[in-house]
Amino acid sequence: MRLSRFFLPILKETPKEAEIVSHRLMLRAGMIRQQSAGIYSWLPLGLRVLRKIERIVEEEQARAGAVQLLMPTIQSAELWRESGRYDAYGKEMLRITDRHDRDMLYGPTNEEMITDIFRSSVRSYKDLPLNLYHIQWKFRDEVRPRFGVMRGREFLMKDAYSFDLDQEKAVESYNRMFVAYLRTYRRMGLTAIPMRAETGPIGGDLSHEFIVLADTGESAVFCHSDFLAKEIPGEDVDFDSDLSPIVADWTSNYAATEDVVDMAEFEAAVPEEKRISARGIEVGQTFYFGTKYSEPMGAKVTGPDGKDVPVHMGSYGVGVSRLLGAIIEASHDDDGIIWPASVAPFHVGVVNLKPGDDLTDGACEDLYAKLEAAGIEVLYDDTDQRAGAKFASMDLIGLPFQVVGGPRGLKDGLFEVKDRRSGEKEMLSPEAAFNKLKAALTV
Amino acid sequence: MRLSRFFLPILKETPKEAEIVSHRLMLRAGMIRQQSAGIYSWLPLGLRVLRKIERIVEEEQARAGAVQLLMPTIQSAELWRESGRYDAYGKEMLRITDRHDRDMLYGPTNEEMITDIFRSSVRSYKDLPLNLYHIQWKFRDEVRPRFGVMRGREFLMKDAYSFDLDQEKAVESYNRMFVAYLRTYRRMGLTAIPMRAETGPIGGDLSHEFIVLADTGESAVFCHSDFLAKEIPGEDVDFDSDLSPIVADWTSNYAATEDVVDMAEFEAAVPEEKRISARGIEVGQTFYFGTKYSEPMGAKVTGPDGKDVPVHMGSYGVGVSRLLGAIIEASHDDDGIIWPASVAPFHVGVVNLKPGDDLTDGACEDLYAKLEAAGIEVLYDDTDQRAGAKFASMDLIGLPFQVVGGPRGLKDGLFEVKDRRSGEKEMLSPEAAFNKLKAALTV
């Protein structure tokens, strides 16, 4: 993509309203724009990252056997009356009346609707296990939205729902999502620690919050430091096998959020030098809640004994839009964002220091074309801004590599290649630059 | 994808509420489920088609130079008061009050918001032309939603917005979208005819509706039959060149919807044997509306003469979710849908007639794996339903090819390969079947 044809409204000033670094950097880097309190437009750079995160989530959901569908944003209040949550939900639910005076709402979550879809078409235990998920915009009318996309009102969430014949099978489904989550976050460069959590308004018996440690996290968390060095299940993990040893390994050490922590237990379970007491950002949550919705809503299947039983359900959320904030909180420096390559909006920024100069244009255009042909996504700065502004913007938007071409270096046939994370710079020939980037960025 | 692990709730009965064939077939094929009047869930099969359509739209928008972002669904009423449309829009706008009693709405379109984004960051004519688009859910509170996704309340639309210094440049932007639309629809197997249209509530001077002819279309249309044989600009069309000859060619013959048709003009312009008087489905619309929004909302740029002028704008919609209905209306038979390969939910259905039989399982699994490895998307029916139900479902969901493996044919090492559109069947060896499908389905 040529920068001259892209839309990248970089802010020179630091926006005053932004309290945390990810919010500041997303605004400055032209990734988002606030339209109303807690409601954002995703500008082209931000949207590219959002889509990369979605793809990773989708790939890992598919690997774990979840099937994607898409439920609408607007729901009928009727469904929520069936489950009893319409009155219980409170002011965070955006309630709407349509032109025919029907009570509607903007979905804050989808347990009721997916239960309705399930009960309308599944009859037999033979069709189980089933895990259906979607990635859809939700709305929660927070009293005080803040921290940018970290606590917005309109936000993008992946929510999966599992259906099983009994608790034992439901725990197998729970374990599949648990393992998928470990892989999902790690692929984005994050270490997310599963912590015991309150089950909250969804209700249920078994639940983990997946927490990324960050100074700006919304809640205090307490865990064992061994989590930071644990291995993640590989791509070849067999989701048809018994995953309980992996889950046991990842839940054997103490980890709890402030809502449920028992300090005496924490101190008894974790040697002092291994105790982490920090702040954390919740990036996902898994629940097993049994028949809480299937019972009142009549979602039943016929079991092997011919009897109808309400299905056992779980739900599994990933805060897709919030993850951008979490990744930036975990990966930035004073100059700006440092994207992991897996979610970077582009892989490489090619900076032309003298557009109009034949030598520079030729070398930059050539490298740009070769990288794109190799499947590497390039933002090519072909604009006539000054060099200092170009460098600052590239650091701010945080692409993994920068390649700078100017008349001075190119006279000797050399580009400067900079690794954004380490800051290391090398002068390389076009071939060497291409080969280095290709080796670093393709699998 | 193994059917045993997919979610495909085929309906045996024809739903009574569905008045038109696309609605009936989408419900029967388990593509959608109605959640409220005019509000649908996209079940896995439907979502796969929706995503294919989105990808084609995105590729052609990018080719034409439009840059993708994503605006939120919920908008502030304030913006719409600035343009004067808040009161003008009527009951189709879903009006919402949030917990702080602020007037909000579910966006039916985005002229105001994109104008706000533009004015907040673009200052100079040097940053033009600019075309920003998104693909986002919209809501229009129709009095009487019907025809399934053809006239839903919550629907997915691609809307692009162009910004230019003056009318001449704006027409160049208009032409780029016009040409992109010709390519977009053709890639989905449709012939969409650009027709003169009323500009409606958006207002403006220059507008075309892109209409697909179909008996179930919502409006009467009148056009020259030469449109049906016209060539579409190729992949190599240069969007930086003067596109007005292409637009002139595609607008030189008479074509108008009932809202604007002048029958005397139609009859004078088109020889009797070339007159088409038919019904049509609108699948997109292009507008040039000058400074209608930029003027009241203060979206100005500094021109080359140093003076500030309001930008000239256009907007360009594609009815993404509605296109599924339009494609089915244009491509089906008594047995079900016939998907063009470009938007098919899967390319091939492999039907195992005897799961559990070693020979059949081995041959089917092997072909399934080989096709997937070649990048061909397969729905593998590994279920234990009876053969008749399997064939009926495959015809209903309309994948371009079916490959049937049973003990009788495979004893001689042969699959039956069926072309869904022509109905032709051939007995082929696994190698020949693979080669035929690969040749037909990969470019």
Image: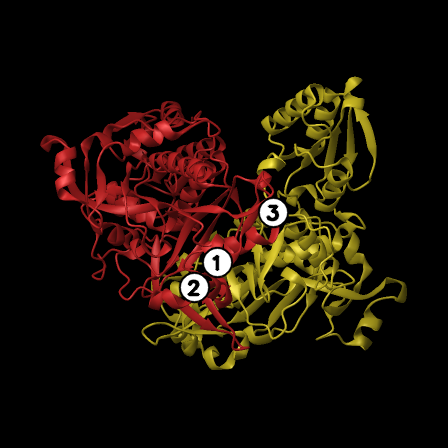
Chain colours: A red, B yellow
Query: Quarter holding the C terminus of chain A?
Result: top left
- Tell me the crowding category of disc 3: few under 14, some 14 to 19, or many 20 or more residues within 10 angstroms, Cα based: some
Q: Is residue A409 visible?
A: no
What amino acid type is highlighted by mark number 1?
Pro
For numbered disc 3, what is the local secondary structure? loop
- Tell me the crowding category of disc 1: few under 14, some 14 to 19, or many 20 or more residues within 10 angstroms, Cα based: few
Give the number of the disc on residue A84.
2
Q: CA distance from mark 2 to mark 1?
A: 8 Å
Residue B397, horizontal then vertical, whole percent:
70, 45
What amino acid type is highlighted by mark number 3?
Arg
The residue carrying mark 3 is: A123
Decide: marks 2, 1 in contact (CB < 8 A)? yes
Give the number of the disc on residue A296.
1
Decide: marks 2, 3 in contact (CB < 8 A)? no
Q: Are marks 1 and 3 on the same chain?
A: yes
Q: CA distance from mark 2 to mark 3?
A: 24 Å
Between residues B115 and B384, which one lies in front from this camera angle? B384
Hey, which residue is sitting farthest bottom in the picture? B87
Residue B33, horizontal then vertical, whole percent:
60, 56
**Disc on the earlier residue, 2 or 1:** 2
- Please tell me whether residue A314 is drawn above or below residue B267 in the rendered image: above
Query: Quarter holding the N terminus of chain A?
Result: top left
What amino acid type is highlighted by mark number 2?
Gly
Horizontal placement of B132 versus A395: left or right?
Answer: right
For numbered disc 2, what is the local secondary structure? loop
Residue drawn 31% across and 64% down? A142
Horizontal placement of B36 versus A173: left or right?
Answer: right
For numbered disc 1, what is the local secondary structure? helix
Callout 2: chain: A
Residue drawn 53% across and 60% down? B159
